Amino acid sequence: TIVMEGSTSLEKLANSTAEAFMDKHLNLIVTTKFTGSSTGVEALINGDADIGNASRGLKDTEISEGAVENVVAIDGIALITDNANSVNDLTREEGSGTRGAFEELLDIEGLCQYEEEIDATSGVMAKVASTPGTIDYVSIDILNESIQAINLNGVEPTSDNIKSGYYSLSRLFVMATMGEISYQDELNQ
């Protein structure tokens, strides 16, 4: 059994990785838990998980405890609103991996006061879709027709714009391990 725990933003990637691994190794079970980035890395460090999924880079304290950052993707953070909202572009100068990356990228750490805190990406999407005038942020890989993505400084949050660096709100997707990948046993690679 291999246990992956962590970021709700990595749910699609973690589940597809787990399925592909189990297809290749029929005698293994890979379990996935989506409890948040910090909780996943903590579970890795405490020995309760084999892989800690984080939707942010690892903190120095996590690295000092032996966690190794294995970057598996770069994700864009889309600003979103309900479909009836006429806002379609914003210009800006300034727990959750997504929140941490959002605040760090905009240099507003510790300055935000949130009206309501929702601890799962799916909950954020549902709340924004059903609450007129709401603006929030999510990983671009879960965008759908229930909400609209807002351009940032005239740039649309697309994979191509993130890869090219035109869209500035992006972060690392990490599957952390204890020690380098080369030190993992064959089944954990």
Image (cartoon, grey):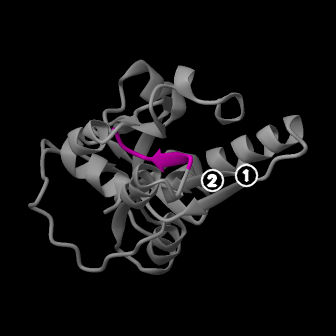
Q: Residue at x 22, y 38 (%)?
A: 60
Give the labeled residue for mark 2.
3
Secondary structure type for disc 2: strand
Image quadrant assignment for residue 46? bottom left
Task: Describe residue 171's horizontal placement relative to residue 185 as left or right.
Answer: left
Residue 160 percent across, percent down from the top left: 51, 26
Give the labeled residue for mark 1.
1
Residue 118 percent across, percent down from the top left: 39, 75
Image quadrant assignment for residue 113? bottom left
Residue 138 or 130: which is nearer the viewer? 138
Q: Is residue 176 magenta?
A: no
Q: Residue at x 40, y 78 (%)?
A: 132
Q: Residue at x 63, y 44 (%)?
A: 13
Contact? badges 1 and 2 (CB < 8 Å)? yes
Task: Describe residue 18's horizontal placement relative to residue 146 as left or right.
Answer: right
Which residue ends up furthest to the left in the rendered image?
Answer: 111
| Residue 7 visible from this viewpoint | yes
Q: Residue at x 35, y 25 (%)?
A: 166
Q: Is residue 52 magenta?
A: yes
Residue 28 percent across, percent down from the top left: 82, 47
Task: Describe residue 127's horizontal placement relative to residue 112 as left or right.
Answer: right
Considering only vertical position in the picture, is 165 above or below 24? above
- Amino acid type, callout 1: Thr
Mark 1 and mark 2: Cα distance apart in space: 7 Å
Task: Name the image quarter holding the C terminus.
Answer: top right
Q: Which mark is residue 122?
A: none
- Amino acid type, callout 2: Val
Magenta segment boundaries in residue numbering: 50-57
How many C-alpha atoms fall within 10 Å of the one at disc 2: few (<14), some, or many (≥20)?
some
| Residue 79 visible from this viewpoint | no
